[in-house]
Image (tube, grey):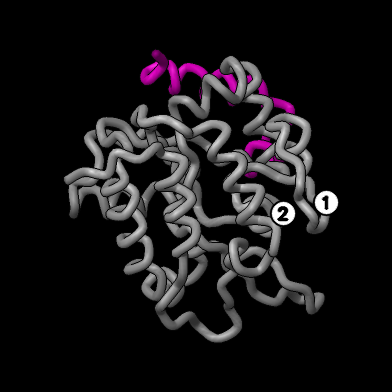
């Protein structure tokens, strides 16, 4: 029997059980906001109950893996603490205040798309690897790490990526179109796995928000327009 609960409750249960069981290369650790940050689970649950308390199928929008200043703090992909409070109206967060480049782009796009209610009523952000990865940089501080940054890391995380995709599709997300954020290795990985396992009918790849904000800021509106055109395909 299929799970008829609202997506909000399925997503909250999904977040509650997130864990990584593999062995990572030396110097890399997993960042789990739902366990590392006491308020992340609380505010993310409030977010999902605000925007996902129904059974309408959403399309997946898949990033790379959570960063320290967005989902690493709030538990919500591409949502930093500023956008969580000022755009989503979710209060109660008690951790460090953060600003993330990716979040700034995403919420500018969502604003032009028609707002949070409209976008989140049709889409759900996640990542191929749903937990963050960090390593120690040259200055001795932790920095974000991508699941594909080395062959060893890609091999160590592939089972978790596959398990994540299967879990999401079992939750009832749409499979005709999947959006992939990241035109390089993230897209290559998702296309390779999709060719092997047939998860989605089509994958639409878009430039990653961080890449746009870091390297193409002067052309930001052009990329927002590209996002708007791509998401017209599922607009209803």
Secondary structure beneath dot 2 equals loop
Q: Residue at x 64, y 74 (%)?
A: 135
Q: Residue at x 78, y 74 (%)?
A: 141
Image location (x, y in percent) of residue 87:
72, 29
Q: Secondary structure at mark 1?
A: loop
Res 69 label: 2
Is any atom of residue 134 visible in this view? yes
Closer to us: 40 or 211 = 40
Decide if residue 112 is on the left or right side of residue 96: left
* Residue 26 picture quarter: bottom right
| Residue drawn 50% across the image and 82% down it | 25
- Percent position of residue 83, x then y: 73, 36
Instruction: Name the residue at 80% across, 55% down.
Output: 94
Picture quadrant where residue 117 is located? top right
Q: Residues within 10 Å of mark 2 (few under 14, many from 20)?
A: many
Q: Is residue 135 above or below residue 111?
A: below
The outermost residue toward the bottom is 26
Does 112 appear above or below 152?
above
Q: Which residues are magenta?
A: 210-236
Please check the rendered image and state whether residue 216 is part of the magenta-colored stretch, yes or no: yes
Viewer can see residue 183: no
Specify whether 89 is left or right of 165: right
Determine the CA span between mark 1 and mark 2: 8 Å
When asked about the image quadrant of residue 144, the answer is bottom right
Secondary structure mostly taken by the magenta-highlighted segment of the chain: helix
- Residue annotated with mark 1: 97
In magenta segment, residue 11: no
């Amino acid at each position: 029997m299929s799970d008829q609960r609202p997506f909000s409750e399925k997503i909250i249960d999904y977040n509650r059980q997130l864990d990584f069981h593999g062995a990572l290369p030396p110097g890399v650790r997993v960042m789990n906001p739902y366990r590392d940050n006491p308020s992340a689970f609380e505010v993310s649950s409030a977010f999902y109950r605000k925007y996902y308390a129904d059974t309408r199928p959403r399309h997946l929008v898949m990033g790379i893996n959570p960063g320290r200043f967005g989902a690493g703090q709030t538990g919500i992909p591409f949502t930093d603490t500023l956008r969580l409070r000022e755009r989503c109206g979710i209060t109660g967060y008690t951790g460090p205040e953060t600003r993330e480049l990716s979040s700034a782009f995403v919420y500018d796009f969502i604003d032009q798309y028609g707002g949070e209610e409209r976008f989140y009523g049709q889409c759900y952000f996640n990542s191929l690897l749903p937990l963050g990865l960090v390593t120690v940089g040259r200055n001795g501080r932790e920095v974000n790490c991508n699941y594909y940054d080395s062959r060893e890391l890609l091999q160590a995380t592939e089972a978790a990526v596959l398990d994540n995709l299967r879990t999401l599709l079992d939750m009832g997300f749409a499979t005709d179109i999947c959006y992939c954020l990241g035109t390089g290795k993230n897209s290559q990985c998702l296309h390779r796995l999709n060719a092997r396992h047939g998860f989605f009918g089509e994958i639409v790849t878009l430039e990653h928000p961080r890449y746009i904000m870091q390297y193409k800021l002067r052309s930001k509106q052009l990329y927002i327009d590209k996002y708007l055109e791509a998401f017209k395909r599922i607009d209803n």
